[in-house]
Image: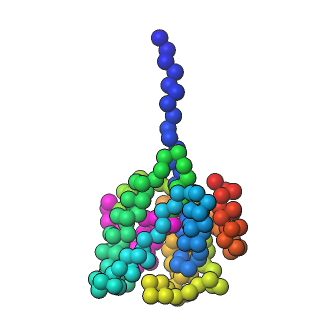
Amino acid sequence: MFYEDISYPLKTTRIVLTGAPATGKTTVSQLLEGLGHTVFHEQAREIISDSLENGTDILPWKNLMGFTQVVWDLRNKQFDSALLETKNFYDRTILDSYAYLLKGNVQPLDNWTKDMENRRFDKVFLLPVWPEIHALDSERMETLEDCIEVEKFIIQAYEQMGYELIIVPKIPVKQRVAFILERL
């Protein structure tokens, strides 16, 4: 007797929003979420803010490995929390953490390398450095020049792991979101 297999894999789509600080990722993420999409937000600013408030050294400029471990674990938790059969957007991923390791000339731990190989994303959108919207604050200390340098390492990290980056134009946020959604 023949039985037809009617099962099918549940497609979980993972979409990355990446770029240097102050490129509009958070604004794009918030609009996507407002449109009903599942969005996993960046946690680095919150970790930095908490560390500054509590006087700990979990700061990228004081303890890159310690900071990276905290962020890495949170980003892996986000990856594992993706909703099945839907589009999941990520405001930065473990590959962004890897980019900062590259910038700091620090080798990733072996388990981090395995994570990057095994935790894959479907599309990667790069929001490029945009001088007109760049601003500093207590958690964002990168100058415009630093942001340009970070962007180079982000591109290197994603391309090194086999991703093709889709560059999001510097246009109003609603048009940026439309640009992204049209390419899914």
Residue 112 position, x and y percent, is 35, 62
Q: Single out the residue that lies furthest toward the top.
A: 1
Residue 121 position, x and y percent, is 51, 55
Q: Is residue 145 left or right of residue 139?
A: right
Question: Which quadrant of the figure contains the C terminus?
Answer: bottom right
**Residue 132 in view (yes/no):** yes
Q: Residue 128 lies in what quarter of the image? A: bottom right
Q: Residue 94 lies in what quarter of the image? A: bottom left
Total labels: the figure holds 0
Q: Is-magenta flag for residue 99?
A: yes
Q: How is the image coloured?
A: rainbow
- The structure residue drawn at horizontal position 52% and vertical position 88%, both measured from the top left corner, is 136
Q: Is-magenta flag for residue 33?
A: no
- The structure residue drawn at horizontal position 47% and vertical position 70%, both measured from the top left corner, is 42
Residue 20 position, x and y percent, is 53, 76
Q: Which residues are magenta?
A: 91-111
- The structure residue drawn at horizontal position 47% and vertical position 84%, both measured from the top left corner, is 140
Residue 124 position, x and y percent, is 57, 61
**Residue 64 in view (yes/no):** no
